[in-house]
Amino acid sequence: MARPLVYATPHSRAAGEHLARSLGAEFGRLAVRRFPDGESYVRLHTPPKDRDVIVVASLDDPDDKLIPLILLLSTARELGARQVGLVAPYLCYMRQDRRFHEGEAVSVRVMHALIGRYIDWIATVDPHLHRIHNLAEVYRVPAKVVHAAPAVAGWIASNVDKPLLIGPDEESEQWVSEVAQWADAPWVVLDKVRHDARNVEVSVPETEKHQGRRPVLVDDIISTGRTMIETTYHLRAAGMLPPICIGVHGLFAGEAILDLYHAGVEEVVTCDTVPHPSNRIAVAELLAEAVRELTA
Ligand code: R5P
């Protein structure tokens, strides 16, 4: 039987090549571009017929990436792929999981139903699961979630002396507690109130007994950076050392990365789910392992 075939969208090429090497798969050639009027064009140069196809596409800035992805997935299937799996190191549209105000689109349901029509399985890293507790609630196909916690804890253990792990809100407890357990470090979780996309309030952390430790803020997503910036102000006012900010997925909307450094953080570190100069923590091998299990 032919080796599996990995295609990657342009932005995820490095992750796709890595995955193909790890799996002993072929890295497929394809073209993805835009017509002058903004429509997407996709062509599969390596034929997918009778192959097990794996598509690697990280979905930050999703509205630009979803149409080429749907064209890629559907064309692979139409041209005879035996099965088509999706590896989305960052999975978009996970936050609007209910109708908070009358008339709103519940985008989690709509977008994942759309993607789910074209795939046989999906693997991702720490999706933002809140009121939806399990990816199986939005995907009918087999879904595998990779947890970045052991990789994040490994990075902290090798790079930070006397860390104090801090989760900026109740939702972050799930990953902060897991990272803290792996890193064998103390941890606290704060209360956060988000007034709107760019206005965030966090509780003042109780830090007296942790003076002298290096605060390490851990969250799943860094988007505008406001959550970590507000927390940094409180920590600095309480006389704590400048914090290290770790995000599993660094989206960095607008000038977020500069805003974080201006706020006085020591360092911003992310996993390599979304390509960015702050990537220090590799999760590619954890994803390869998940794909092996899904395709075994
Ligand atoms: C919130 O629900 C997430 O876990 C993150 O705390 C949030 O996405 C961070 O966003 P921002 O960087 O815009 O404060």
Image (cartoon, helix red, strand yellow):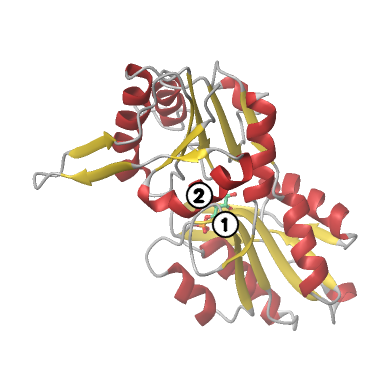
Looking at the picture, tell me which residue is in the foreground, 71 or 231: 71
Q: SS class of the residue under badge 1?
A: loop
On screen, residue 199 above or below 54: below
Q: SS class of the residue under badge 2?
A: helix
Where residue 213 sits, quadrant-wise, is bottom right
Name which residue type carries label 2.
Glu
Other-residue count near label 1 (Cα within 10 Å), few / some / many at <14 / 14–19 / ≥20:
many
Is 53 left or right of 30, judged from the image as shown? Answer: right
Looking at the picture, tell me which residue is in the foreground, 263 or 199: 263
Which percent across, then down, holds residue 199?
47, 60
In the picture of the structure, the residue carrying the numbered disc 2 is: 17
Is 26 left or right of 215, judged from the image as shown? Answer: left
In the picture of the structure, the residue carrying the numbered disc 1 is: 272
Residue 37: mark in rendering: none
In the orientation shown, which residue stands out farthest toward the front?
1
Is the N terminus in the top left, top right, bottom left or bottom right quadrant? top right
Residue 73 appears in the rendering: yes
